[in-house]
Image (cartoon, grey):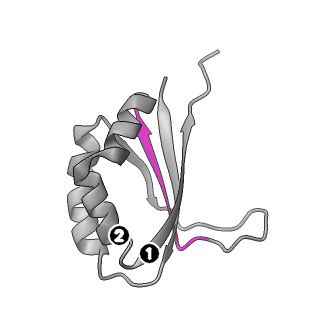
């Protein structure tokens, strides 16, 4: 079943972004994933949490692929780079079964 990683980013500095976004697509594709949203111009619709500076939605064939991507050495090295200038809230969810 298709799975998605949904993330909300608060960006403190952009120093990490060029290298991160140059390298992460290859790691993502190696795990069967792809970007559906990158940046996305977030706008608050409801709630009181701070509106994120950016949002991401990553699509994978299933949870196993998503977890393999997230836990891979290649992605974790990039995640460390990302953490030098941002904070991320991320969740893993499944697509609804087709009716």
Please state which of residues 41 and 74 is positioned toward the viewer in this rendering. Answer: 74
Please state which of residues 71 and 85 is positioned toward the viewer in this rendering. Answer: 71
* Residue 33 location, quadrant: top left
Above or below for 37 versus 29: below
Q: What is the secondary structure assignment of the residue under circle 2?
A: helix
Above or below for 83 versus 67: below
Please state which of residues 39 and 81 is positioned toward the viewer in this rendering. Answer: 81
Name the residue located 28 percent from the left edge and 37 percent from the top edge.
Answer: 31
Q: Is the magenta stretch mostly helix, strand or loop?
A: strand
Above or below for 23 versus 2: below
Q: What is the magenta range?
A: 52-60
Name the residue located 78 percent from the left edge and 62 percent from the top edge.
Answer: 46
Circle 2 sits on which residue? Answer: 82
Q: What is the secondary structure assignment of the residue under circle 1?
A: strand
Residues under numbered marks 1 and 2 in contact, where contact means CB atoms less than 8 Å apart: yes
| Dot 2 crowding, Cα within 10 Å, few <14, some 14–19, many 20+ | many
Distance, label 1 to label 2, CA atoms, is 6 Å
Name the residue located 62 percent from the left edge and 26 percent from the top edge.
Answer: 96
Circle 1 sits on which residue? Answer: 86
Q: Is residue 55 left or right of residue 32?
A: right
């Amino acid at each position: 079943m298709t799975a998605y990683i949904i993330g909300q980013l608060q960006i403190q500095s952009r120093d990490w972004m060029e290298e991160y976004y140059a390298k992460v697509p290859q790691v993502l594709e190696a795990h069967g994933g792809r970007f559906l949203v990158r940046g996305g111009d977030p706008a608050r619709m409801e709630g009181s949490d701070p509106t994120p500076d950016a949002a991401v939605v990553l699509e994978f064939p299933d949870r196993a692929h998503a977890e393999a991507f997230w836990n891979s050495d290649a992605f974790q090295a990039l995640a460390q780079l990302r953490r030098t200038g941002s904070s991320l809230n991320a969740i893993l969810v499944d697509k609804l079964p087709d009716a």
